[in-house]
Image (cartoon, grey):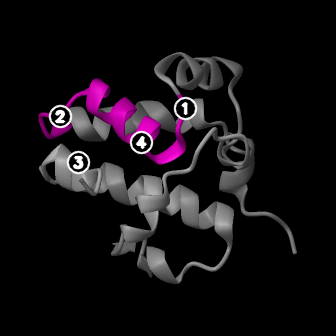
Amino acid sequence: MTKHKIYTMSVASVYPHYVTKAEKKGRTKTEVDEIIRWLTGYSQEELEAQLEKKTDFETFFAEAPQLNPSRTLIKGVVCGVRVEDIEEPTMQEIRYLDKLIDELARGKAIEKILRG
């Protein structure tokens, strides 16, 4: 089976779209970074280094320092698919991130987004 195209895309190529989506709704790049750090365990410096290296999504999640155990609390639909039902682990991580960014853009409180 061939890998989905998103696996080989760099996080840096999609990241500006996450920021734009958030900023259009009055949220900030800082909040986007906070969500990514919460999900992956990267520090701000490590996140910036991954973006600078143009790391692909598959590597980005494979090398994540500490995937947040609370990420399994993320429920809902992204691109017509329930994130909790996605069986392929890397695709599920990508969709978790998409769902968190969607919640941010919808105005949900950061504490609730981070399952606090």
Tag 1 and tag 4, C-beta contact below 8 Å: no
Residue 97 as seen in the image, left or right of residue 42: left
Q: CA distance from mark 3 to mark 2?
A: 7 Å
The amino acid type of the residue labelled 4 equals: Trp
Q: Residues within 10 Å of mark 2 (few under 14, many from 20)?
A: some
Q: Quadrant of residue 2?
A: bottom right
> What are the residue bounds of the magenta stretch?
24-42
On the image, numbered disc 4 is attached to which residue? 38
Tag 3 and tag 2, C-beta contact below 8 Å: yes
Residue 5 is situated, as x and y percent measured from the top left of the image, at 71, 56
Q: Secondary structure at mark 1?
A: loop
Q: Residues within 10 Å of mark 1 (few under 14, many from 20)?
A: many
Residue 111 as seen in the image, left or right of residue 46: left
Compared with 17, 104 (above or below) is below
The amino acid type of the residue labelled 2 equals: Arg
Tag 4 and tag 2, C-beta contact below 8 Å: no
Query: Is residue 105 located in the magenta-colored stretch of the structure?
Result: no
Q: CA distance from mark 1 to mark 4?
A: 8 Å
The residue mark sitting in front, 4 or 2, is 4
On the image, numbered disc 1 is attached to which residue? 42
The number of numbered badges drawn on the structure is 4
Q: CA distance from mark 4 to mark 2?
A: 17 Å
Tag 1 and tag 2, C-beta contact below 8 Å: no
Residue 110 is situated, as x and y percent measured from the top left of the image, at 19, 44
On the image, numbered disc 2 is attached to which residue? 27
Q: Earlier in the sequence, mark 3 or mark 1?
A: 1
